[in-house]
Amino acid sequence: MQSNPLFHELNETALGKIVQAGHLARKLDGEYIFFQGDPALRTYFVLEGKVKLAQLTTDGQQVLMEYIGPGRVFAIIAAIPNARYPVSSQAVGDAAVLFWQRETMNVLTESYPVLSTNLLRVMATQIGEFQNRIRELSTQRVERRIARVLLRLARQTGRKLPDGELIDLEISRQDLAEMTGTTLYTVSRTLSQWENVGLIKSRRGHVVISHPHELVLLAEDTPK
Amino acid sequence: MQSNPLFHELNETALGKIVQAGHLARKLDGEYIFFQGDPALRTYFVLEGKVKLAQLTTDGQQVLMEYIGPGRVFAIIAAIPNARYPVSSQAVGDAAVLFWQRETMNVLTESYPVLSTNLLRVMATQIGEFQNRIRELSTQRVERRIARVLLRLARQTGRKLPDGELIDLEISRQDLAEMTGTTLYTVSRTLSQWENVGLIKSRRGHVVISHPHELVLLAEDTPK
DNA sequence: CGAGAATTTGAAATTACTCAACTACAGTGG
DNA sequence: CCACTGTAGTTGAGTAATTTCAAATTCTCG
């Protein structure tokens, strides 16, 4: 647990207090934890399962910001008075989360100043990742973006199988499209193409990367 | 100064100490403050002038992350041990900045815990903005993205002129392309088109928005 | 004035989207 | 156990958006 970026340099006692100050909530598959636009009152920590954060456009499209797995905090924005959640969050599969009210967060960060630093660290990492994503969306073609997303998901949730790396996440073409800023048709075509050359195998809702190394080649900037 | 998000709820004395703990640096137009990949050792605050943050792709393209004006902090990532700057920063016009070493930052945040909260706030705002940008890049067409960038720049650096709102920033087609994830050709075409219908006026390096209201219409999601 | 950089514009090529039709699959209830 | 239904996925054809490349033009600065 000490290895968790949020709990870095906090001893057992402190950690115990922090966990005790939080509330446990269980969420069923698909259940929303909060909605975009809601007053941001709670900061969350994922204990079990996965949570997805997505932003809705005014015309109803979704943009999938990230999947959050066990051991990660989200909605740190709730530490700030009068903020609203900029995204909605939804359980993917059944999930257990811990949450703290803003007041509690303030008390905790005052008692354990290193907690603030840790939160800063988490957010800084986050910013770096978003910057990379902005760079990718700005400069890379769809195929490459899809390749990168698959590799990232494999890294985060991957499970080794005899015939490749399974992305252990119920994931649709639509989801991949929302992650890469394209349409489900283009995702479908791209995956079909990769399947034809034996790069991946996909059945409904699942993807297995048969040859990660070759997918990496596609994902990299290869200046011709 | 108290109205600055970074100095929120800090009194004059504290503010004085914080400023005194920083070092002043002057930068000439175009001078780099740090480079992407450098060890992140200092956090900065813009006193005068403007600074731009850009990320380079491996094949040498630039992506312009943001322009930072007076009163804003950047490179908070330096608060974190062993981090590297994920972007380069460069003065746009002559600029004056204040900076603190990581150690100083740590001392300051310990002495003034509210400073941590303020930093969190700044970063949370930042994250929200990046999420919006990701959404825009994922779902909107180039024309709309350009419109939004012009309006944002006008908001941040705008000056009222008799014939419209001047974006008070030496800005090239290339810059706009790097901000919107498109090519300088498309930017040029789009601006020409807007100029033809009297929406804007542009000379080399400058843009005046003649009819902001109509540009807003273009910038908004208008579900047909 | 001249040189280099920024900008504009046309034309062709490419990428990705849209729409529509079709197929495959999983779960339900008889 | 199987037919049924709705959702997920595939694919083709046409189209729209954007990029690419090349060539001209304009601007700025020394």
Image (tube, coloured by chain):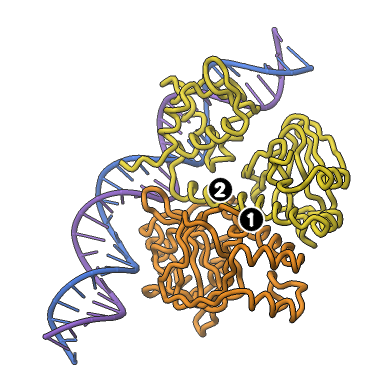
Chain colours: A orange, B yellow, C purple, D blue
Q: Residue at x 67, y 44 (%)?
A: B54
Q: Give whichever of discs 1 and 2 has the lower sequence position.
A: 1
Residue at image mark 1:
A127
Q: Residue at x 43, y 59 (%)?
A: A177
Above or below for B121 versus B97 = below
Q: Could you tell me which chain the residue with mark 2 belongs to?
A: A
Quadrant position of the N terminus of chain B in the picture: top right
How many numbered discs sit on the rendered protein? 2
A172 left or right, relative to C30: right
A147 left or right, relative to A81: left
Q: What label sits on residue A139 in the rendered view?
A: 2
Q: Residue at x 40, y 42 (%)?
A: B221
Q: Amino acid at mark 1?
A: Ile
- The quarter of the picture where residue B223 lies is top left
Secondary structure under the numbered disc 1 in the rendered image: helix
Depth check, front residue: B108 or B216: B108
